[in-house]
Amino acid sequence: MRPQAILSGTKVLVGNNTLKSQLIERGFGEKVENRLELSLIEALFLVDEGKVDVIEGNRRLSFEELVKKGTAIEPEFYNKYKVYADLRKRGLLVRTGFKFGSDFRVYERGVSVGEGHSKYLVHVVPEEYSCSLPELARAIRLAGNVNKEMIYAVVDEEGDVTYYKIGRVKL
């Protein structure tokens, strides 16, 4: 039987000490008092990888049920999950990028949270996304101001992810 975590609103709570330690070491969640709080995307990834079961009430939630709950909160939830999972499977540490105005901040391979700084800001967009040049310039400027590189992750209709690094060229 897999370790269990409990869905509580928009967070998934981990109380099992062994699981907590393993997840913290791998850069998952936020420690709050004596528990670990996972985001829905982190929990979905762990469910998909067969590492944990998420429980609501007395029943285990399926992958599809968690996607549905996430999508009810955030319309692009599944696309963000696809990018999150792809980056994690590449061995990268992925954390929320909300305070930087992006979906994720990404650390290079081998860096731990608190040990170094993230290198990239990742913004997830659907294939049909369009934006203005000033919007693109703002994203690049913001990333540059915090010493990060801006990446747009484009998710197509088949769920494939393509990454575009955008930046400023100085002549």
Image (spheres, rainbow, N blue to C red):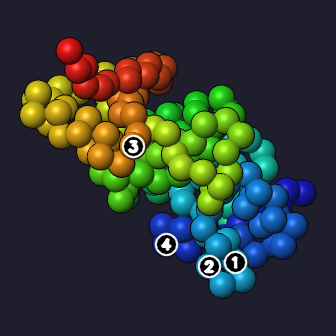
What is the crowding at mark 1: few (fewer than 14 residues within 10 Å), some, or many (at least 20)?
some
**Mark 4 sits on what residue?**
9
Which mark is in front, 3 or 1? 3
Foreground disc of the pair 4, 1: 1
Q: Kindly report which numbered mark, 3 or 2, lies closer to the viewer in this rendering.
A: 3
Is residue 165 placed above or below 61 in the rendered structure?
above
- Judging from the image, what secondary structure is the residue with disc 1 in? strand
Percent of width and height locating residue 67: 51, 47
Q: Earlier in the sequence, mark 4 or mark 1?
A: 4
The residue lying toward the viewer, choosing from 109 and 102, is: 109
Residue type, label 3: Asn
**On the picture, is 25 further left or further right than 100?**
right
* Number of marks drawn: 4
Residue kind at label 4, given as amino acid type: Gly
* Residue drawn at x 29%, y 46% as measured from the top left: 145
Q: Which residue is mark 1?
A: 35
